[in-house]
Image (cartoon, grey):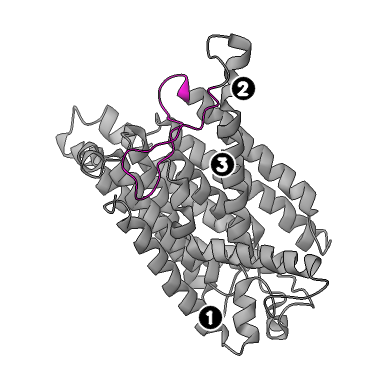
Amino acid sequence: MLYWLLYEKLFPFFHPFRIFRFLTFRTAFATLTALLISLFIGPYVIQKLREFQIGQYVRSDGPQTHLKKAGTPTMGGILILIAILLPTVLWADPTNPLVWIAMASTLAFGAIGFVDDYTKVVMHRSLGLTARAKLIAQAAASLAVALSLVALTQFRMFSTQLTVPLLKHWRPDLLWHAWPATIPQLSLLAFIPFVLWVTLVLVGSSNAVNLTDGLDGLAIGCTIVAAGALTVLCYVSGHVMFADYLELQRMPLVGELSIFCGSMVGASIGFLWYNAHPAEIFMGDVGSLALGGAIGTVAVLIRQELLLPFIGGIFILEALSVILQVGSYKLRHGKRIFKMAPLHHHFEQCGWKESKVIVRFWICALVFALFALTTLKLR
C-alpha cells in the first residue's frame, strides 16, 4: 500500500520517495513495523484473552511441571497474524501475486488453528478438531496454494523446477511429462506430482511447527531463525546479480517475499517478548499452524523445499521424534524410543531445565539455518 502510494503514485512529484523502490529499505521497515505492532498490541491482546478466560489447557499425561501453565492466555497467534499481514500489506508491492499467495496461505492455516483452539478452549472440547478433520482442512488449504501456482505457471510467472542443494545444474521438473500437453483435457494431469508435493510440504511444515510448540518461546524462537534464513534466500533468489552469481533459478517475483519474511521475523521477535519463559501468552494452534504454513509456503515459492530440513531443522527433528515414537509403540508392542515425545519433552524427562532445553534448541536451529545458507555457495 505504501509502496503503491508513495512510489508508484507520488514519486514523480516528490523524488525523495524513490527510497521506497529499494527492497532492502522496505524489508527493514516491514520488520520494524511488525515488531512494534507485536510489542504495542501485545498487552491489549493478553488482557482481552484473560477477560474472555481463554486459557491454556494442559494435558495430564504431559510433564507434571507444565501443570502450572494451565490457564495462561492462549490463541496469541492472532497477534502474530496481525503483525505479519499488516506490515506486508503496507510495504510490499500489491501487484505481486506471490505475496498474496503467501499471505492467503498463512491466513488459511491460521484459520484452521483458530477453529481448533476455539473448540478446545472456548467450547471446552479437550481434543479440539479430530486429527482427520485437521489434516483434511490442511490438505484443502495446501491444494488451493498448489492450484494457484499451477495457474501462475500458465503465465510463466512460476516454475515447477525444484532446486537441489549442493547441485548446480540438476533441477528436476515436478511435471508428469507422460501426459501430452497437446491434449487439453489431460494437460492439468501433468501437474499431479507437483500438487501432491506442495500438499506434502505444507501439511508437514505446519504440523512440525505445531509439535514444536510445547515450551515457552521454543517454537517462536526457532521461527525467528527460520524466517531470517528465508528472508536471505528470498532476497538473493529475486536479485538478478546474486542469483546469477550463486547460479540460482531466476525468479524476479520472489524478491518481494523478503518483505513477508521480514514481517515474520519482526512479529516473532515481538511475540517472544511476551512468550519468553515464563510465558505470559501462548500462540496456540492459530499461531503454530499459521507459522508452519507460512514457512512451508515460502519454501515452495522460492523452490527451496529440499532445504526445509535445515532451515527448520528443529521442527523436522520434533516431528520425526513423534513419528518414531508412535511407530515404535505400535510395531514393537508398547516399547518406546524416547522417554516422551516430542523431543523437547524427552530432554525434560532426562533432567534438563525448561530454559536449558529452549536455549540449546535455539542454538541448534541457528546452526541448521547457517548450514542451509552455506549450501548456496557449496554447489
x, y percent for residue 73: 66, 69
- State if disc 1 and disc 3 touch (CB < 8 Å): no
Q: Cα distance, mark 2 to mark 1?
A: 46 Å
- 85, 352: nearer the viewer: 352
Label number found at residue 357 = 1
The magenta stretch spans residue 155: yes
Identity, as a three-letter code, of the amino acid under mark 2: Leu
x, y percent for residue 85: 48, 46
Q: Would you say residue 40 is visible in this rendering?
A: no
Task: Identify the residue at image location x=63%, y=12%.
Answer: 185
Secondary element at tag 1: helix
Task: Identify the residue at image location x=67%, y=41%.
Answer: 139
| Residue that carries the numbered disc 2 in the rendered image | 189
Identity, as a three-letter code, of the amino acid under mark 3: Ser
Q: Would you say residue 259 is visible in this rendering?
A: yes
| Residue that carries the numbered disc 3 in the rendered image | 105
Q: Main secondary structure of the magenta part?
A: loop
The mark lying in front, picked from 3 and 1, is: 1
x, y percent for residue 291: 54, 54
**Mark 2 or 3 closer to N-term?**
3
133 sits to left or right of 241: right
Q: Residues within 10 Å of mark 1 (few under 14, many from 20)?
A: some
The range drawn in magenta is 153-177
Q: Quadrant of the N terminus?
A: top left
